[in-house]
Image (tube, grey):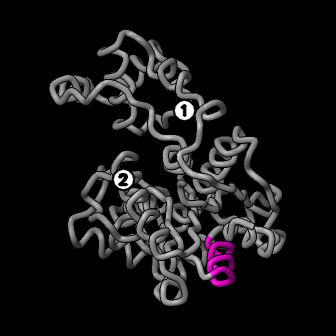
Amino acid sequence: MPPRLVVIVGPTGAGKTRLSLALAEKTGGEIISCDSQQVYLGMDIGTGKATAAERARVAHHLLDVVEPDQDMTAARFIAMADAAIAEIAARGKPIIVVGGTGLYVRALLLGLFEGPPASPALRAELAALGSAALREELERVDPAAAAKIEKNDEKRTIRALEVYRLTGEPMSAHQARHDHRTLPRRYDARLIGLAPEREELYKLIDARVDDMIAAGFEAEVAALRARGFQPPLRSQQAIGYAELHAVAAGEVDRARGIELIKRNSRHYARRQLSWYRSDATIQWAPNPAAVDLDDVGRYLAGL
């Protein structure tokens, strides 16, 4: 029988880390981070990674597993997460998954869309076209995918076009057959979502960015730059890092850079909520204090 999980989801700044720590301490559980940026070494403040003190309180998994210049795919992440879940379950510990990356959460619970294998030659051909031409072709052949892929996300754009050229069918059509509303789950999981009212969420996000700056976020980015980690590395295009790299490069002034982090974080939070809202199984709460930890603990205990 597969292990039982509690999965905490929601937008950036909603309090997922705080809730996960409270639940883990109450149940004796361990936490698996399901975040596409917290996997990177040296990217701590800007990703909202659990602090050293928090990790001393509760065991965390899948933090700091790759360098910033290494790729982390959903498939690679799921393989690591499966191994961590099996290891924690073997020790009889409750498992709490905390996810800001909706794709990773969905892939962990339902598996990945299995498209055609990568074609290095085709990818090189597509990359040579340039971002503008790639985007134009994607909007023409797969408008549904184009609506979901950020304009500057060349990696996902190339993958969508690769699927189309290799199969003659839009990637969105393939994914529609991999519908999360009808697929069986790989794990028995209870999903808890945190979703403050929009005005409150925006205040939390702005305060969170201010706290990151005060905690030394700019020095963190400077250290990454000193090690040669800069855009266009995918890891360095994450919200917060991209803007502070631009400040460091003299492309934008500091005050504007910080405001852009807040604005882009608010936009990202809206996209996160839109992604999660499509899952009717998520039990929503406005804040961590509104979650009944005793009830969740009973679920994890199989009661």
Residue at image coords 48%, 80%: 59
Measuring from the top left, give residue 258's x and y in whole percent. 54, 65
Give the quadrant of the C terminus: bottom right
Measuring from the top left, give residue 13's x and y in whole percent. 65, 65
Which residue is nearer to you in this view: 239 or 300?
300
Local crowd size for mark 2, using a 10 Å CA cut-off: few (<14), some (14–19), many (≥20): few
Residue segment shown in magenta: 17-27
When the figure is inspected, residue 48 is found, relative to residue 80, above or below; the finding is below
Quadrant of the rendered structure where residue 210 is?
Answer: bottom right
Residue matched to label 2: 79
Question: Is 60 colored magenta in this rendering?
Answer: no
Farthest residue, direction top: 168
Question: Is 19 colored magenta in this rendering?
Answer: yes
**What amino acid type is highlighted by mark number 1?**
Lys
Q: Which mark is residue 268?
A: none
In the displayed structure image, the side of residue 248 where residue 216 appears, left or right: right
Residue at image coords 41%, 51%: 78
**Helix, strand or loop for disc 2:** helix
Task: Determine if residue 224 is in view.
Answer: yes
Residue at image coords 58%, 64%: 98
Measuring from the top left, give residue 146's x and y in whole percent. 50, 26
Residue matched to label 1: 148
Task: Determine if residue 206 is in view.
Answer: no
Residue at image coords 42%, 39%: 152
Give the total of numbered labels. 2
Q: Counting residues from the N terminus, which is met first, the one under dot 1 or under dot 2? A: 2
